[in-house]
Image (tube, rainbow, N blue to C red):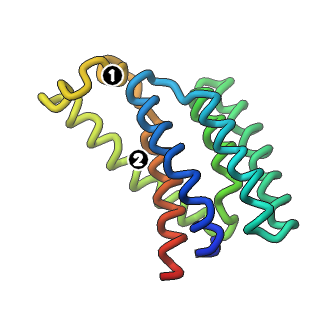
Amino acid sequence: MAITATSALYFLPFVLPLCFYVAFTDMARMKITNQAVIALALVFLLIGPLVLPFDTFLWRLCALVLVLLLGILLNAVGAIGAGDAKFCAAAAPFVAPGDLRLLLALFMAVLLAAVLTHRVVRATALRRLAPEWQSWHEPRKFPMGLALGATLALYLVFGALQGA
């Protein structure tokens, strides 16, 4: 992996709870909140300069802007939700450019597992554990925050474990 174990380890305790929050709120309310996205970006802005070389930090900030612009475009044509676009932008700087292919493969695997799990739970009595969750009642929509949050969390966990 191109991400260093050290940077992944430093980001992980701050990013992991945000990823869980994003997955939870998207399943419960079909929303990725601006507060979560801002908090994720702030984690990078505060921790990034401490664990990354300054030029790398700046290039990763450029990735945030680029992904945000792409997300705005995709949202404008109805391909993705606004919260998904903003989360991807805030998550982009955490990903080392050399890991992009790995991240896409990880995302595909996580997305498949998340969709299958969500559909199975929605179709069984397990949904009674949280009957008020809006994602159970949206047959044509999927809470992408579940897959996006899990992907970022797993990427950082794998990055941190490479040093073990």
The residue that mark 1 highlights is 133
Type of amino acid at the residue the image marks with label 1: Trp
Circle on res. 111: 2
Q: Name the residue type under label 2.
A: Leu
**Left or right: residue 80 compared with residue 127:** right
Q: Residue at x 41, y 25 (%)?
A: 141
- Rendered position, 91 above or below 159: above
Left or right: 153 with respect to 53? left
Q: How would you rate the neighbour count of disc 2 (Cα within 10 Å): few for under 14, some for 14-19, many for 20 or more?
A: some
| Residue at image coords 69%, 36% | 38
Q: Measured along the vertical axis of the image, is residue 32 above or below residue 160?
A: above
160 or 83, nearer to the observer: 160
Quarter of the image for the N terminus: give it.
bottom right
Where is residue 65 drawn, in percent x and y?
Answer: 79, 44
**Relative image position of residue 86 (x, y in whole percent):** 66, 35
Mark 2 lies on a secondary structure that is: helix
